[in-house]
Amino acid sequence: DLLKQNITVLGMPQSMFFRDLGKRSRESHNLHQYMADAHATREQLVLTWRQKDSYDAAKKVYPYATNLLVPDIAFALELDPTKHCTLAPRAPQLVDLILVLRKDAESTLGTYRSNEFVRHVLDKLPGGAGAGVTFWLSDWTDTHDRLCTDARQADPLSKSASFDTEKMLKGATSLLSHGKVVVTDRLHASIMSLLLGLDHVMVEQNYGKIHQTRAVALGVSKACGEPAVTSHFAESSGLADALGKAVAMLRHQGDTKG
């Protein structure tokens, strides 16, 4: 309908992932047909991609559209630690590690996503490094259930919601602020941690979205590779590896702060 009204359609930065390549082909065919019906030019449909592999694929899958490689839109957030990073009284107070780990099909953790596994790994770290380390295993749903004063208003899925962007943002940053080090397999939790200057360790989800999306954004400037930036984050080969690296970051914080 928009194309028929000669309106340019701009897609927000996405990752492309299809388990069913037949579905990808059908979607491309349908989209091409919509453009033909509207007599639209490729300049009227602009698709943006936050991963290099998605961008390369899109040029083949959607050759009739304009495809651009751009950083994820979350990098445009203006986050102020003094404004957004506040602890919520109904949530656990400051812990050593805040684990923001997804529960959906993109997770690679399976049964390892549990308090028992995390405690076991921490207790087995060499030299007793993880002994006494406190943690909170959570996900974005905790921003609604425990961190917002009005969960219904903050939840965009609620039919009666009055969407409040600032409240959602404060809920997300508050969750991250409940730990001295963040461990996450959520892309936007990692981006927010980066923007807030929080030490964080990334556990990749099932199609490489976190590493590849961050690589596009951080590759635009040499400054992004400076130690002042890179010392605040690390990648991992899995949750156990991430916990070990997070504890090392935690201990380094203690050393640098005396």
Image (spheres, rainbow, N blue to C red):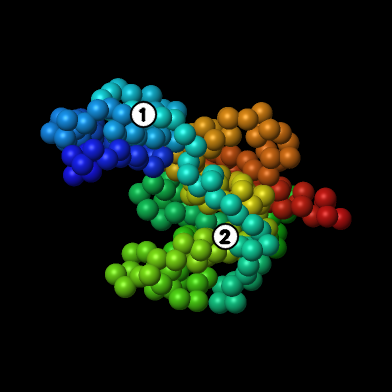
| Residue located at (63% from left, 30% from top) | 221
Give x and y (percent) for residue 249.
71, 48
Give x and y (percent) for residue 178.
62, 64
Of the numbered discs in the image, which one, if any, rests on residue 20? none
Local crowd at mark 1 within 10 Å, few (<14), some, or many (≥20)?
many
Circle 2 residue: 173
Q: Secondary structure at mark 2?
A: helix
| Count of numbered tags | 2
The amino acid type, in three-letter code, at marker 1 is Asn
The reply, left or right, for residue 64 in relation to residue 71 is left
**Which quarter of the figure is the C terminus placed in?**
bottom right
The vertical placement of 48 against 187, above or below, is above
| Residue located at (57% from left, 60% from top) | 173
| Residue located at (28% from left, 27% from top) | 42
The amino acid type, in three-letter code, at marker 2 is Thr
Circle 1 residue: 67
The vertical placement of 75 against 94, above or below, is above
Query: Which of disc 2 and disc 1 is earlier in sequence?
Result: 1
The reply, left or right, for residue 38 in relation to residue 231 is left
The reply, left or right, for residue 71 in relation to residue 63 is right
Q: Secondary structure at mark 1?
A: strand
Q: Is residue 124 visible?
A: no
Camera-side mark, 1 or 2: 1
The reply, left or right, for residue 151 in relation to residue 157 is right
Which residue is farthest front?
6
Local crowd at mark 2 within 10 Å, few (<14), some, or many (≥20)?
many
| Residue located at (77% from left, 52% from top) | 253
